[in-house]
Amino acid sequence: MANRVAIVGIGQTYHTSKRDDVNQPEMVAEAVRSALTDAQLSIRDIESVFTGNMETFEGIFLPDHGMAAEIGALGKPGFKVNTGGTTGASAVAEGFYMVSSGLYDISMVIGFEKQDCGDTTAAISAAAVPVWAKGAATGAIGEFAKQALSYMEITGGTEEHAAMVRVKADKGACRNPYAHLKLGLQSIDEVLQSPYLVWPLRLLDFCPQSCGACALILATEKKAKKIHKKPVWLADVEVVHQEPFRAGVFGDPTGKETYTQHVACEKIYKRNNITDVRKQIDMAEIYEPSNWEELNLYEHLHFCKKGESWKLIEKGITEIEGEFPVNPSGGVISTNPIGATPVIRVAEAALQIRGDAGEHQVTRDTKTAIATALGGPNWTVMFLLKRSL
């Protein structure tokens, strides 16, 4: 690539189920102002703006057109991106490509969702053609329930292991000032006593509907070193989209490991000579709408051998104080403003590398991290972040 790309500004709103105090543009502007403050830049310094949200969840068509003034995008080039659950990560990838190509020196990427404006569940259920994608049309809850059942049958993992993941997530969320759900869970029994949505998926096994926004400012190497004392480098990006819809199936029955998570991580690992993930990468922020999905992703992203992900959580390896922390922010299962969710994964990984994550800073010295995004039809976007190049 022509230019190396760094994150020089990070801004988030706090997240909650309802933001009655602001409209959508005002909410997004909070994240923009925070990112500009972090980078010590003016909106005049931003050359292009890339936004992403799931507009069908809010019922507001092309919302970027209605908030250009509030977010500082008026008269500036950019794209509005929507690629399902990977939307925010696709927006970050767009910003990365534009800066790395040399087209712009400084760009801003914004992901957002104000789910109190619409009906997300209805939009998900009605988004697919039932004959062609019946699984998608049933909605996310049914698919993640099937995934949970498959996981238990194939690996021997249990509901107790999934509950351990949920307690870990809540521990991180309670330390994170921006997180939505802060339940103060003290034991796995509290998770196991929550009602079933669709067996074996319980209420506390699944993510909330959140309102919030996250903004990143990206810059070329030449600009980055002048803007921020601790730039975080986007060392590599991989985008893998696949059809048809296959969520709910653990592993690949053909044995060919064609899941997009496998493809994405193996390409990044190969390009960066990563042969031992847990030794060469310090932590991860991964997209897990369910605690069962987190257990799946441990294996899909090669954090452990197949069928052994439950051992990682049982041994405390992925805890905030563990050998390989995963989602110390509380993750998607605690906070899910869908268009912003993938941007938050990148932002939180960058904060860990900078050492600026506050109370949810991991104890391991973080020089390298990965961040991922997940889309319903088995889509993956993956980032490798580094403190130095």
Image (cartoon, rainbow, N blue to C red):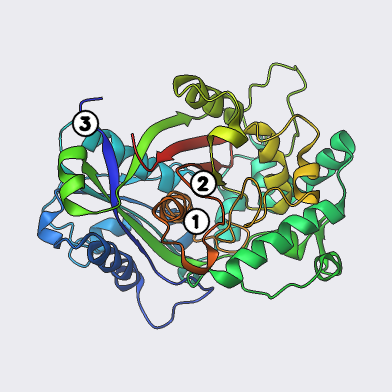
| Percent x, y of residue 178 | 48, 70
Badge 1: how crowded within 10 Å, few (<14), some, or many (20+)?
many
Q: Earlier in the sequence, mark 3 or mark 2?
A: 3
Residue name at image x 55 percent, y 63 percent: 335
Badge 2: how crowded within 10 Å, few (<14), some, or many (20+)?
many
Tell me how far mark 1 sits from mark 3, CA to CA.
30 Å
Q: Is residue 268 left or right of residue 276?
A: left
Amino acid type, residue under disc 2 in the picture: Gly
Front disc: 1 or 3: 3
Q: Earlier in the sequence, mark 1 or mark 2?
A: 2
User: Which residue lies under the disc numbered 1?
Assistant: 338
User: Which residue lies under the disc numbered 2?
Assistant: 85
Label for residue 3? 3
Taking the image as drawn, is residue 180 in sight?
no
Residue name at image x 33 percent, y 34 percent: 389
Tell me how far mark 3 sits from mark 2, CA to CA.
28 Å
Amino acid type, residue under disc 1 in the picture: Ile
State if disc 2 and disc 1 touch (CB < 8 Å).
yes
